Amino acid sequence: MISDGAYGVRGFHGDTTGVDDLVDWYRPHVAAWDMAATPASTLWFWNTEIGWATVHPLLVAHGWEYVQTITWDKGVSHIAGNVNGKTIRRMPVVSEVLVLYQRRFMIDAPEGPMSPKVWLRHEWQRAGLALNRANEACGVKNAATRKYLTQDWLWYWPPGAMVEKLAAYALEHGNRDGRPYFSIDGENAVTAPEWDALRYTWNHAHGLTNVWSRPSLHDSERVKGNMERSAPRVHNPSLASAAHLNQKPLEFMERQVGAVTNAGDVVWEPFGGLASASVAAVTLGRRAYVAEIHKSFQDLAEGRLRAAANSSTVLTAVNA
């Protein structure tokens, strides 16, 4: 999911007039996301620093775990001569934040909910096996005990192939009572594909950090059109005919989509606007779903999506 909703800055019709009302604004949406989210779901959340900080507790309460914050540095040109240094009484703001969340995953064991880290060691010990025998099960020197079954900071999520080996070894060598071991559903041991599907996708891009530097859109990518009546007065003449004041660069949206999804995966954009996230998703071969309640934005978004779909079809044909 890619959320680019209310910021509490009166940026669009329906936005709140301050951050105090943001939690109530987002509450029904976040509750609805729960119904569709899986353990492998991710959420990208765009906002201001204070807007995100205000909504963060709500997201945590609904099972979203913080991963990291990306800062969009728009550069000095974003403010240019539009700031009165005698009255602002603070540093000019040239940034927005984009926060990545993963879905909290807990396994329902007879003893109660457990994190994967606790559950893996619990299942191995429940089978009555010494910890060092996990290395034999996985065919490694010491990585299984040191990384997969440890309970300290060295633990990390084991590959599905290794969990499948642990399960098979426990079935063959573990106590006969208490089977099956390493079972999510209580009936069968978890398989490698099932285990891997419980963790979100991550496609690493070397050289890309958590600070993204790029000016706001003032070029041909900026969609032109009639601005909303409730939008604030525009100080920058280059934005005077902008259809949407907060249009995000497609480059950024493609980074987000590409990082946590693979071809054919679903991308949900609940606050579409000009549907930039969905355009990026279509371009990258994902299945895009987008919602937008304002008719003027709907029309512009549909045009962008049709163009992206046509371009994607042409690229597919060329690559084939």
Image: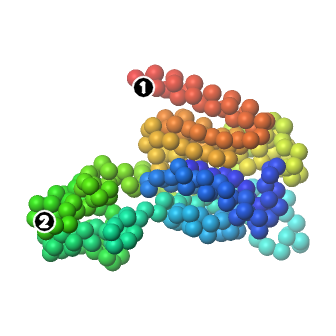
Residue 60 position by quadrant? bottom right
- Given contact means CB atoms under 8 Å apart, are the residues at marks 1 and 2 in contact? no
Horizontal side of 155 relative to 142 (left or right) equals: right
> Residue flagged by tag 1: what amino acid is it?
Asn
Residue 265: image tag: none
Residue 90 position by quadrant? bottom right
> In this view of the protein, which residue sits in the foreground, 219 or 21?
21
Q: Residue at x 29, y 61 (%)?
A: 158
Q: CA distance from mark 1 to mark 2?
A: 54 Å
* Total marks placed: 2
Residue named by callout 2: 176
Q: Residue at x 77, y 48 (%)?
A: 245
> In this view of the protein, which residue sits in the foreground, 39 or 258?
39
Q: Secondary structure at mark 2?
A: loop
Residue named by callout 1: 319
> Residue flagged by tag 2: what amino acid is it?
Arg
Q: Earlier in the sequence, mark 1 or mark 2?
A: 2
Q: Residues within 10 Å of mark 2 (few under 14, many from 20)?
A: few
Give the answer, above or below, for where 309 lies relative to 262.
above
**Where is residue 145 shown, x and y percent of the image?**
21, 71
Q: Is residue 187 visible?
A: yes
Horizontal side of 119 relative to 291 (left or right) equals: left
Q: Residue at x 83, y 74 (%)?
A: 89
Give the answer, above or below, for where 220 lies relative to 249.
above
